[in-house]
Image (cartoon, rainbow, N blue to C red):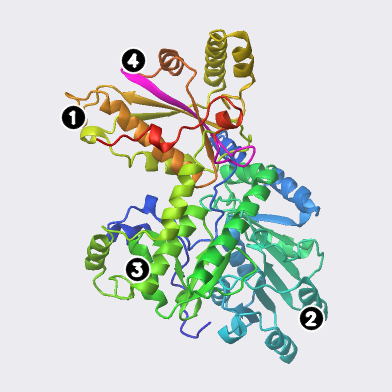
Amino acid sequence: MSDSFDPFIEAYHGGVDSAELIRLGIDPELAIDFSSNILPFGPSSQVLDAIRNTPIDRYPDRECRRLRGGIAALHSISFDRILVGNGCSELIHGIASALIRPGDPVLIVGPTFSEYERATRLAGGIIHGCVAIAEDGFACPVDSMDSALSRSPIALVWICNPNNPTGQSVTRERLLGWLKKHPHTLFVIDEAYIEFAVSVESMIDCELENLIVLRSMTKAYAMAGLRLGYAVLCDSLHRRMRGRRAPWSVNSIAQTAGLAAINDQPYYTNAMVRLHEAKGSLWEGLVSRGFCPLKSDTCFFMLPMEDAAGVRNGLLLNGLVVRDCRSFGVESQLRIAVHTPSNNLRLIDALSKRMSRSSLPGWTSSPNMQIEVQAANHAHCEVDWDDDFRHGLNRLFRRRRDVRRFRCDAIPAGSMKRWIEAACLAPSVGLSQPWRFVSVSSPECRASVLKEFETQNEAAASGYDDETAKRYRALKLAGLREAPEQLAVFVDLDPDQGRGLGRGTMPESISYSVVAAIQNFWLAARSERVGVGWVSILRPESIVAILGVPSTWQLIAYLCVGYPEVAVDEIPELEREGWEQRANLESHWIER
């Protein structure tokens, strides 16, 4: 909050800056974003279905009636108190333009989201600031707030709760005290991150004339690209805001996706549990390596770092995007949003290398970033894997296990793409990359595959004696009914790529290459606690026909993918069921 602040210059915000990454030779699609506070597991399958099925040849409902009905039911509040906007940013600027008059004194509790200040200055308001400080752990300066509110009339107060970037919060009791003590001051409580917090109490049910509560639907519901938020406010304020809004600012896709998200609360509840588990692991990992992350009530936190800008640039060279808090007016701090467990480990590893190799190119600011990219890439050609990594990798091998018992809940959006990208890193004969992946989502195709399995499974059972057949039929050999994702993996037997290198002497190697890709996919999925089951009781020619793929493709594997119904054991299920025992190493290793 500075007098030099220019409201006519767009503020800096978190998120992947594609132009910056492209300049550095980094694919923006592969960057991991720790700078935006977005649910990293993606939206629910119901949201994706709603997006696919939304007609776009008609105008959206200007009043957002169905979405407002869903929001009202979610919070048990009146439908008429809800105003939907194109993200909270639109609502913030709408509040300022409608409710702040030139010369109005406006109080901002900082450091915080810069759009409060920008919107206020554009409306002609006069900024008064109460700023949290590092010495107090960036806790809300409640004494300064009390003094500022009592010293002179304040027209409007902006409070982000829990606050961005500090993760600190103000109690409901404290907020209610301010609201009741200062009835002529309008309080705007931005609860954009409240779904990420466990113990922060919402103000959304408080029907007070001097209160506006803002909620974002882009962050906790993983829909940042759609822009969606809403305000909850009294009738008189609702009328003033509604009269100034742009028509049709909330598009049809955002409205239907928002309603679908509200209607799929179990998915998001489960996702938040997973995210808080990931936060605990990330926090412990940083602390164990000597870092001192600051306390936060939500799933992002500040990390003290002497050369925050240099560290941010160094991480960027590794494809890891974090937020430098100078844009909030805070020096020597990074803001880190919790990501998936595997990506959190990458961040811990990269930061740890910074601690032990402070001279590594890229960790300090430099005018020649392109040279740093080349130097960093060269430095990372040889990686010193430590004992923790080797232990974890060995544990991953042991827990790779074939999974046949799945939960039905959906895999987070983007996960399959990420795991297939990992599969495509596998070695292939002559760099032929002969693997072909087909996601099987059609109910008709899945039913045909299940019928083929049941037919062949019964045929296999009939080949055993009565007692063995009984034991065979008792085995659970596939998760075709439950697994949310099914993936057929084929080999193109004669790909142009690779020019036939290596295939003249060992033609089978082209199929072996696909098996290596499947192993990569399997391990990548398992590292994120997702199970994979390989269904082999299928005739390859039948699957080729069912899926209508080219006749030159041959089925290598039919995979069921989903969250395991029970914890995955290191002992194979067939061994636990007494069907077969794992042989010892001496049975497989011959020395000559």
Note whether 489 is above or below 296 in the view shown.
Answer: above
Q: Which residue is mark 3?
A: 314
Amino acid type, mark 4: Ser
Amino acid type, mark 2: His
Q: Earlier in the sequence, mark 2 or mark 1?
A: 2
Whether the residues at callouts 3 and 4 have beta carbons within 8 Å, the answer is no
Mark 1 vs mark 4: in front: 1
Q: Earlier in the sequence, mark 3 or mark 1?
A: 3
For numbered disc 4, what is the local secondary structure? loop
User: What stretch of residues is rendered in magenta?
Assistant: 552-571
Q: Is residue 114 visible?
A: no
Q: Which residue is mark 1?
A: 502
Amino acid type, mark 1: Gly
Label annotation for residue 182: 2
Q: Which residue is mark 4?
A: 551
Disc 1 packing (10 Å; few <14; some 14–19; many ≥20): some
The answer to whether residue 94 is left or right of residue 287 is: right
The answer to whether residue 229 is left or right of residue 69 is: left
Whether the residues at callouts 2 and 1 have beta carbons within 8 Å, the answer is no
Q: Earlier in the sequence, mark 3 or mark 2?
A: 2
